[in-house]
Protein backbone atom coordinates (compact mmCIF):
# COMPACT_ATOMS: atom_id res chain seq x y z
CA UNK A 1 0.00 0.00 0.00
CA UNK A 2 1.30 3.45 -0.85
CA UNK A 3 2.73 5.62 1.96
CA UNK A 4 2.64 9.37 1.60
CA UNK A 5 5.61 11.63 2.41
CA UNK A 6 3.91 14.64 3.95
CA UNK A 7 5.02 18.24 4.33
CA UNK A 8 4.17 20.95 6.81
CA UNK A 9 0.84 22.53 5.87
CA UNK A 10 -0.87 25.73 7.14
CA UNK A 11 -3.53 24.71 9.67
CA UNK A 12 -5.78 27.52 8.46
CA UNK A 13 -5.99 25.76 5.08
CA UNK A 14 -6.82 22.20 6.15
CA UNK A 15 -10.52 22.89 5.60
CA UNK A 16 -10.04 22.12 1.93
CA UNK A 17 -9.48 18.43 2.81
CA UNK A 18 -12.33 18.22 5.30
CA UNK A 19 -14.85 20.47 3.64
CA UNK A 20 -18.12 18.65 3.98
CA UNK A 21 -20.44 18.48 1.07
CA UNK A 22 -22.59 19.07 -0.71
CA UNK A 23 -22.80 22.81 -1.08
CA UNK A 24 -26.29 23.89 -0.08
CA UNK A 25 -28.44 26.97 -0.52
CA UNK A 26 -29.98 28.20 2.71
CA UNK A 27 -33.20 30.13 2.26
CA UNK A 28 -34.63 32.30 4.99
CA UNK A 29 -37.50 34.71 5.67
CA UNK A 30 -38.23 37.39 8.21
CA UNK A 31 -41.28 39.65 8.00
CA UNK A 32 -41.62 40.51 4.29
CA UNK A 33 -38.02 39.69 3.35
CA UNK A 34 -36.61 36.47 1.96
CA UNK A 35 -33.02 35.60 1.22
CA UNK A 36 -30.65 32.86 0.02
CA UNK A 37 -27.02 32.15 0.95
CA UNK A 38 -24.54 29.56 -0.27
CA UNK A 39 -23.21 27.28 2.46
CA UNK A 40 -20.40 24.75 2.65
CA UNK A 41 -19.76 24.51 6.39
CA UNK A 42 -22.43 22.17 7.71
CA UNK A 43 -22.39 18.84 9.46
CA UNK A 44 -24.75 16.06 10.48
CA UNK A 45 -24.97 15.96 14.30
CA UNK A 46 -27.73 13.45 15.09
CA UNK A 47 -30.14 11.22 13.12
CA UNK A 48 -33.25 11.21 15.32
CA UNK A 49 -34.02 13.96 15.99
CA UNK A 50 -32.40 15.01 12.73
CA UNK A 51 -29.86 17.66 13.76
CA UNK A 52 -27.63 19.68 11.43
CA UNK A 53 -24.98 22.09 12.67
CA UNK A 54 -23.74 24.94 10.52
CA UNK A 55 -21.67 28.07 10.55
CA UNK A 56 -23.31 31.26 9.32
CA UNK A 57 -21.05 34.29 9.43
CA UNK A 58 -22.37 37.13 11.56
CA UNK A 59 -21.72 39.55 8.69
CA UNK A 60 -24.18 37.72 6.40
CA UNK A 61 -27.65 39.15 5.90
CA UNK A 62 -28.94 35.58 6.35
CA UNK A 63 -27.53 35.55 9.88
CA UNK A 64 -30.00 38.26 10.97
CA UNK A 65 -33.00 36.72 9.20
CA UNK A 66 -32.31 33.27 10.62
CA UNK A 67 -31.50 34.46 14.12
CA UNK A 68 -34.73 36.46 14.26
CA UNK A 69 -37.01 33.88 12.61
CA UNK A 70 -35.20 30.85 14.16
CA UNK A 71 -35.93 28.97 10.92
CA UNK A 72 -34.52 28.25 7.49
CA UNK A 73 -34.63 25.75 4.64
CA UNK A 74 -31.52 23.86 3.58
CA UNK A 75 -31.83 23.29 -0.18
CA UNK A 76 -29.55 20.92 -2.08
CA UNK A 77 -28.71 22.09 -5.62
CA UNK A 78 -27.30 19.98 -8.47
CA UNK A 79 -24.41 20.79 -10.78
CA UNK A 80 -26.57 22.57 -13.36
CA UNK A 81 -27.07 25.32 -10.77
CA UNK A 82 -23.33 25.65 -10.00
CA UNK A 83 -22.76 29.13 -11.52
CA UNK A 84 -25.84 30.43 -9.69
CA UNK A 85 -24.69 28.80 -6.45
CA UNK A 86 -21.36 30.65 -6.66
CA UNK A 87 -22.98 33.94 -7.65
CA UNK A 88 -25.46 33.70 -4.75
CA UNK A 89 -22.48 33.31 -2.44
CA UNK A 90 -20.85 36.40 -3.87
CA UNK A 91 -23.51 38.96 -3.13
CA UNK A 92 -25.58 39.97 -0.16
CA UNK A 93 -29.33 39.92 0.31
CA UNK A 94 -29.03 43.27 2.02
CA UNK A 95 -28.44 44.72 -1.50
CA UNK A 96 -30.47 42.43 -3.78
CA UNK A 97 -33.53 40.19 -3.86
CA UNK A 98 -31.72 36.95 -4.68
CA UNK A 99 -34.86 35.03 -5.72
CA UNK A 100 -35.57 37.71 -8.36
CA UNK A 101 -31.96 38.31 -9.39
CA UNK A 102 -31.22 34.59 -9.96
CA UNK A 103 -34.69 33.68 -11.34
CA UNK A 104 -35.29 31.12 -8.61
CA UNK A 105 -38.80 30.11 -7.57
CA UNK A 106 -39.81 30.32 -3.92
CA UNK A 107 -42.15 27.45 -3.01
CA UNK A 108 -44.13 27.34 0.23
CA UNK A 109 -42.77 25.12 2.98
CA UNK A 110 -45.05 23.12 5.26
CA UNK A 111 -43.74 23.96 8.72
CA UNK A 112 -41.57 27.06 8.39
CA UNK A 113 -42.02 30.46 6.79
CA UNK A 114 -38.76 30.31 4.83
CA UNK A 115 -39.46 29.19 1.23
CA UNK A 116 -38.14 26.09 -0.50
CA UNK A 117 -36.23 26.69 -3.73
CA UNK A 118 -38.16 24.87 -6.47
CA UNK A 119 -35.03 24.49 -8.66
CA UNK A 120 -33.21 22.42 -5.97
CA UNK A 121 -33.75 18.66 -5.86
CA UNK A 122 -34.10 18.55 -2.05
CA UNK A 123 -35.27 20.96 0.62
CA UNK A 124 -35.08 20.42 4.39
CA UNK A 125 -37.21 22.61 6.59
CA UNK A 126 -35.28 23.54 9.73
CA UNK A 127 -36.02 25.05 13.10
CA UNK A 128 -33.33 26.36 15.37
CA UNK A 129 -32.82 23.68 18.03
CA UNK A 130 -29.89 25.15 19.95
CA UNK A 131 -28.54 28.70 19.81
CA UNK A 132 -25.93 28.35 22.56
CA UNK A 133 -22.98 28.43 20.15
CA UNK A 134 -24.30 31.25 17.95
CA UNK A 135 -22.82 34.11 19.93
CA UNK A 136 -19.43 32.49 20.37
CA UNK A 137 -18.95 30.66 17.05
CA UNK A 138 -21.83 31.73 14.75
CA UNK A 139 -22.73 28.05 14.92
CA UNK A 140 -26.41 27.15 14.59
CA UNK A 141 -27.86 23.73 15.47
CA UNK A 142 -31.00 23.09 13.45
CA UNK A 143 -33.56 20.32 13.65
CA UNK A 144 -34.92 19.19 10.29
CA UNK A 145 -38.67 19.10 10.86
CA UNK A 146 -39.76 18.25 7.31
CA UNK A 147 -37.88 16.95 4.27
CA UNK A 148 -38.78 17.19 0.57
CA UNK A 149 -36.73 15.14 -1.91
CA UNK A 150 -37.27 14.59 -5.64
CA UNK A 151 -37.52 10.83 -6.39
CA UNK A 152 -35.19 11.15 -9.38
CA UNK A 153 -32.33 11.21 -9.98
CA UNK A 154 -31.55 8.77 -7.15
CA UNK A 155 -27.93 9.95 -6.84
CA UNK A 156 -27.93 13.54 -8.07
CA UNK A 157 -24.67 15.19 -9.10
CA UNK A 158 -23.93 17.54 -6.23
CA UNK A 159 -21.32 20.30 -5.87
CA UNK A 160 -18.60 20.19 -3.20
CA UNK A 161 -16.26 23.00 -2.26
CA UNK A 162 -12.49 22.40 -2.08
CA UNK A 163 -11.57 25.93 -0.96
CA UNK A 164 -9.73 28.55 -2.97
CA UNK A 165 -12.46 28.77 -5.62
CA UNK A 166 -12.18 25.07 -6.57
CA UNK A 167 -15.10 22.67 -6.73
CA UNK A 168 -15.51 18.94 -6.93
CA UNK A 169 -18.54 17.25 -8.48
CA UNK A 170 -19.94 14.08 -6.96
CA UNK A 171 -18.97 11.02 -8.97
CA UNK A 172 -20.39 7.57 -9.47
CA UNK A 173 -22.00 5.63 -6.62
CA UNK A 174 -20.66 2.13 -5.97
CA UNK A 175 -21.69 -0.83 -3.83
CA UNK A 176 -18.16 -2.26 -4.08
CA UNK A 177 -17.39 -2.07 -0.33
CA UNK A 178 -20.86 -2.75 0.90
CA UNK A 179 -20.05 -6.28 2.14
CA UNK A 180 -17.49 -4.83 4.56
CA UNK A 181 -20.00 -2.33 5.88
CA UNK A 182 -21.66 -2.89 9.28
CA UNK A 183 -24.86 -0.82 9.41
CA UNK A 184 -25.03 -1.04 13.21
CA UNK A 185 -21.63 0.71 13.41
CA UNK A 186 -22.89 3.79 11.61
C1 LIG B 1 -18.92 27.88 -2.10
C2 LIG B 1 -19.28 28.83 -1.00
C3 LIG B 1 -19.50 28.34 0.28
C4 LIG B 1 -19.83 29.19 1.32
N1 LIG B 1 -20.05 28.70 2.57
C5 LIG B 1 -20.40 29.52 3.58
C6 LIG B 1 -20.71 29.01 4.89
O1 LIG B 1 -20.72 27.82 5.14
N2 LIG B 1 -21.01 29.91 5.87
C7 LIG B 1 -21.05 31.26 5.63
O2 LIG B 1 -21.33 32.03 6.56
N3 LIG B 1 -20.80 31.78 4.40
C8 LIG B 1 -20.49 30.93 3.37
N4 LIG B 1 -20.27 31.43 2.13
C9 LIG B 1 -20.37 32.87 1.90
C10 LIG B 1 -21.83 33.32 1.81
O3 LIG B 1 -22.54 32.50 0.92
C11 LIG B 1 -21.84 34.75 1.32
O4 LIG B 1 -21.27 35.58 2.29
C12 LIG B 1 -23.25 35.18 0.98
O5 LIG B 1 -23.14 36.15 0.05
C13 LIG B 1 -24.05 35.62 2.19
O6 LIG B 1 -25.24 36.14 1.71
P1 LIG B 1 -26.20 37.06 2.57
O7 LIG B 1 -25.41 38.26 3.05
O8 LIG B 1 -27.26 37.44 1.61
O9 LIG B 1 -26.70 36.23 3.71
C14 LIG B 1 -19.96 30.58 1.08
C15 LIG B 1 -19.77 31.08 -0.23
C16 LIG B 1 -19.44 30.20 -1.26
C17 LIG B 1 -19.26 30.76 -2.64
Image (cartoon, rainbow, N blue to C red):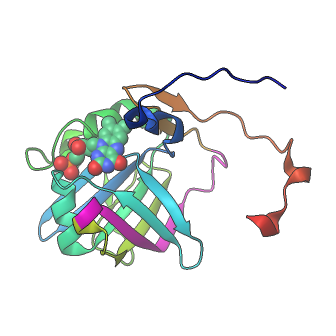
Compared across the picture, whether 8 is left or right of 97 comes to: right
Q: Is residue 181 magenta?
A: no
Nearer to us in this view, 162 or 118: 162
> In percent of the image, x 8 and y 44: which residue is there?
95
Quarter of the image that includes the N terminus:
top right
* Image position, residue 179 (x, y; %): 91, 52
* Image position, residue 26 (x, y; %): 34, 55
**Residue 103 visible to the viewer:** no
Nearer to us in this view, 172 or 102: 172
**Residue 130 visible to the viewer:** yes
> In percent of the image, x 51 and y 46: which residue is there?
20
Q: Is residue 149 magenta?
A: yes
Compared across the picture, whether 147 is left or right of 183 comes to: left
* Image position, residue 68 (x, y; %): 17, 72
Compared across the picture, whether 126 is left or right of 149 comes to: left
Quarter of the image that includes the C terminus:
bottom right
> In percent of the image, x 32 and y 66: which residue is there?
72
Please state the total of marks drawn on the protein image: 0
Examine the rendered structure and indicate whether residue 96 appears above or below residue 82.
Answer: below
Nearer to us in this view, 112 or 3: 3
Examine the rendered structure and indicate whether residue 98 appears above or below residue 10.
Answer: below
Examine the rendered structure and indicate whether residue 62 appears above or below residue 97.
Answer: below
Question: In the image as oriented, which residue stretches furthest toward the front?
Answer: 8
Magenta region: 136-155
Question: In the image as oriented, which residue stretches furthest toward the right?
Answer: 179
Question: In the image as oriented, which residue stretches furthest toward the left?
Answer: 95
- Image quarter where ligand 1 lies: top left
* Image position, residue 43 (x, y; %): 49, 57
Amino acid sequence: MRRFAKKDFPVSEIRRFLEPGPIVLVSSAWKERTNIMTMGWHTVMEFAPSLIGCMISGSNHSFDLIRKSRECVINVPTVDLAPTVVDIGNCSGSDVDKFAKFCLTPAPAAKVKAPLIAECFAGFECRLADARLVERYNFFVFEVVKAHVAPAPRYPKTIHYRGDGLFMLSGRTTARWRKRFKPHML
